[in-house]
Image (tube, rainbow, N blue to C red):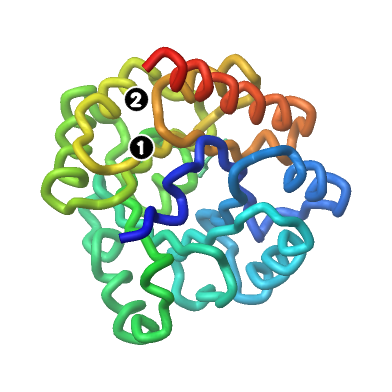
Amino acid sequence: MNSPFYSEWRHVFKLDPDRPIDDDRLAAVCSSGTDAILVGGSSGLTFDNTVDLLSRVRRFETPCALELSDPECGVPGFDGYFIPMMLNTDRGEWIARRQAEALRDYGRLLPWEHVAGEAYLVLNPDSTAAKVTGAKADLSAAEIAAYAQVADRLWRAPVVYLEYSGTFGDMATVRSVRGQLTQARLFYGGGIRSAEQARQAALSAHTVVVGNVVYEDLEAALSTVDAVINSAKEQDHVF
Ligand code: 1GP
């Protein structure tokens, strides 16, 4: 079996189709040396704004994947698709119901060799993602580890995503989760606003996702790319 499309990704910029980004900023982000552009957001995604962003990113060679949380936004032509499944919510619609409805309607159209389930743990209670999904985000380290095992060992999800969106997470917890995973790849996202935070995240997770800072401080955003790639090289050298 071929390696999954995301298996080498260390650094990813996440862009939100619902947030304006001018051509210069988009060019800088896409030409930064990042491994991929991930298109996704917690609200305001439509078919039209998703197509628009994809077509603009396509002017560059950087791979581009979509987090497909709303089947209405199922735009063809991405290099890969992640289907988010929420771990820490009591609302079943976010665990499997919406996904089942999407597959009922669109499953036969999906390029399955480029599709991966993404088991999400939303850990910032103030984030839009937590509010939209009703996530119980205030978890102890032991609870986080247990949810990660559900995803990795029981669901065999290929990706576990620790989502601290908007706030920088606890790296000791992130490292501990990575150490317990048996087959899943660990994505970390949340609150990275500097090269140093990016470096710490790269030492803790397999893949580092950088979002908001792209829109707020481009220079800081761009500095995260080298920080992650260099940290990855250091680790490869050591191990
Ligand atoms: C959001 O995990 C990503 O889904 C990145 O988080 O926007 O806080 O960088 P930030």
> How far across and how far down the image is residue 122, in percent?
36, 41
> How far across and how far down the image is residue 211, in percent?
60, 40
> How far across and how far down the image is residue 68, in percent?
46, 65
Q: Which residue sits at x=20%, y=44%?
A: 152
Image-quarter location of ligand 1:
top right
Q: Which residue sits at x=64%, y=38%?
A: 212
Q: 22 or 112, which lies in front?
A: 112
In the rendered image, the vertical position of residue 231 relative to residue 119, given as above or below: above
Q: Look at the image and tell me in which quarter the C terminus lies.
A: top left
Could you tell me how many numbered marks the image carries?
2
Determine whether label 2 and label 1 are within 8 Å by CB: yes
Q: Look at the image and tell me in which quarter the N terminus lies.
A: bottom left
- Mark 1 Cα-neighbour bin, 10 Å: few <14, some 14–19, many ≥20: many
Q: Which mark is residue 116?
A: none
- Mark 2 Cα-neighbour bin, 10 Å: few <14, some 14–19, many ≥20: many
Q: Which residue sits at x=60%, y=15%?
A: 196
Residue ranking furthest to the right: 24
In the rendered image, the vertical position of residue 101 relative to residue 202, given as above or below: below
Name the kind of residue labelled 1 in the image.
Answer: Leu
Tell me the quarter of the picture where residue 12 sits: top right
Q: Earlier in the sequence, mark 2 or mark 1?
A: 2
> How far across and how far down the image is residue 227, in percent?
62, 21
- Disc 1 on helix, strand or loop? strand
- Disc 2 on helix, strand or loop? helix
Q: Which mark is residue 186?
A: 1
Q: Which residue sits at x=58%, y=36%?
A: 210
How far apart marks 2 and 1 lie (CA) works out to 9 Å
Name the kind of residue labelled 2 in the image.
Answer: Val
Instruction: Nearest to the eye among marks 2 and 1: give it.
Output: 1
- Residue placed under numbered mark 2 in the picture: 174
Relative to 166, 93 lies left or right: left
